[in-house]
Image (cartoon, rainbow, N blue to C red):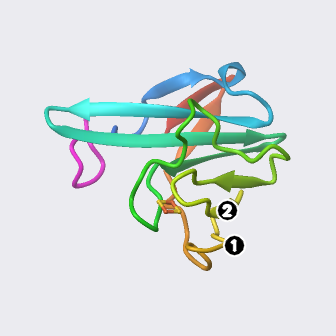
Amino acid sequence: MASSSDNPARPGPGLRLCALDEIPDPGGKGFRFREVERLFAGFVIRKGDLIVGYVDSCPHAGWPLATFGDRYLTKDANHILCTGHGALFRLDGLGVTIPCVGERLARWPIEVRDGEVFTA
Ligand code: FES
């Protein structure tokens, strides 16, 4: 598997992640990739026409954001929640509550083609 960063576990562009229908609307889905001892984690958020990917690593402490399966969004689906210490992020990745005010989730580029989600 080709890598696109210094993390050899991070998949390169063009890898099929899932069918778009496998991601709830609104909702999210996490993905994990392992290469020997390295792990890359990313997730994709879907809400209406918005479909965006982020590296699953909170800027506060580097923890994955979702503790419970694929529950990345708040109940009202207006924010991404880090369950580590409760930081909220807008769906564009900007942190709006402590301890992540003004910090950003790192984008994980994805694209949708013919109802399928791929790394970009
Ligand atoms: S690890 Fe996300 S808020 Fe602390």
* Image quarter of residue 49: top right
- Which tag, 1 or 2, sits closer to the chain's start? 2
- Residue behind mark 2: 88
Instruction: Give left or right: position of 93 versus 41.
Output: right
The picture places residue 96, in percent across and down from the top left corner, at 69, 72
Task: Specify whether residue 3 is painted magenta.
Answer: yes
For the point 85% across and 47% down, which residue is it? 76
Instruction: Give left or right: position of 95 versus 8.
Output: right
Residue 84, placed above or below residue 46 = below
- Residue behind mark 1: 96
Q: Which mark is residue 47?
A: none
Residue 120 appears in view: no
Disc 2 marks which amino acid? Leu
The picture places residue 45, in percent across and down from the top left corner, at 66, 42
Q: Is mark 1 within 8 Å of ligand 1?
A: no
Around disc 2, counting alpha carbons within 10 Å, would you say few (fewer than 14), some (14 to 19), or many (20 or more)?
A: many
Q: Which residues are magenta?
A: 1-8
